[in-house]
Image: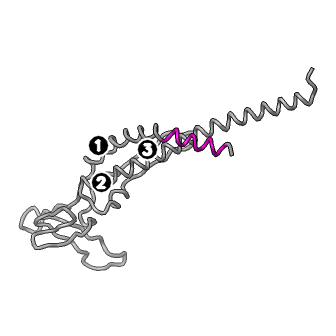
Amino acid sequence: MPGPSSFRESYVEMGEAMRLIAAGEKVYEMAAVSSLNKATRWARTRVIREIAILAKVSPQLLVSKRFKVWRARRGMLFTTMGCFTRPISARKLKGARQTKTGVSAYQHSWPHAFIRRPLRQGFRGVAPEKVFRRFTKKNYKIQYMSIKIQPVAEKLILKWADRASERVMITFPHELEWRLNNAAR
């Protein structure tokens, strides 16, 4: 018949086993969170780069400022990638300048356009410069010039989100193995 000391030992072993099971669940969850976040960051980089190339926008910072990624956390095993798709001002493009025929910036040109400079420095600072184009030869009916990224962004986000889910399947075993090795130390 087992004595009181062996009962305590089995109770301690049982507690240790429960602790290891709970730690194992946490390790699996943290590996999933880490692989989801890595795949989302990877996809975000590719989407921004491709949007900038297809929409002919430079610097890429103009596109990346419009991107938001909600990361996965414990208990919330999903990520979300969002893009604010309002048009990018032509004035913010690299090398925007007034020419004799209009305005040119990076790989774009707008004939009959002009850069509106601020009239004066006011108490609240300088109004930003903007690019406009005239519809007629008269001084009215002008159009604000910008680069639209919405049609390009929607397709690319869906394309790279699918590839990111494939990447999660590749990175998850590596993350799990790394975390299990570190948990054993």
> Which residue type carries mark 2?
Arg
Number of marks drawn? 3
Amino acid at pointer 3 = Thr
Circle 3 sits in a helix, a strand or a loop, which is it?
A: strand
Which residue is under mark 2? 86
How far apart, in angstroms, are the residues tagged by discs 3 and 2? 19 Å
- Is residue 133 shown left or right of residue 76? left
Q: Which residue is mark 1?
A: 155
Instruction: State the extent of the magenta-drawn residues as a range.
Output: 171-183
Q: Taking 57 as reference, is 160 left or right?
A: right
Q: Which residue appears at 10% of the width and 73% of the height?
A: 100
Tell me the distance, in whole angstroms, between the alpha carbons under discs 1 and 3: 15 Å
Comparing labels 2 and 1, the label whose residue is closer to the camera: 1
Picture residue at 14% right of the left edge, 73% below the top: 99
Q: Position of residue 172 (x, y in %)?
A: 51, 39
In the rendered image, which residue does mark 3 sit on? 80
Compare residues 112 and 165 and report the one nearer the observer: 165
Tell me the CA gap for discs 2 and 1.
Answer: 16 Å
- Residue 21: image location, x then y, percent: 68, 33
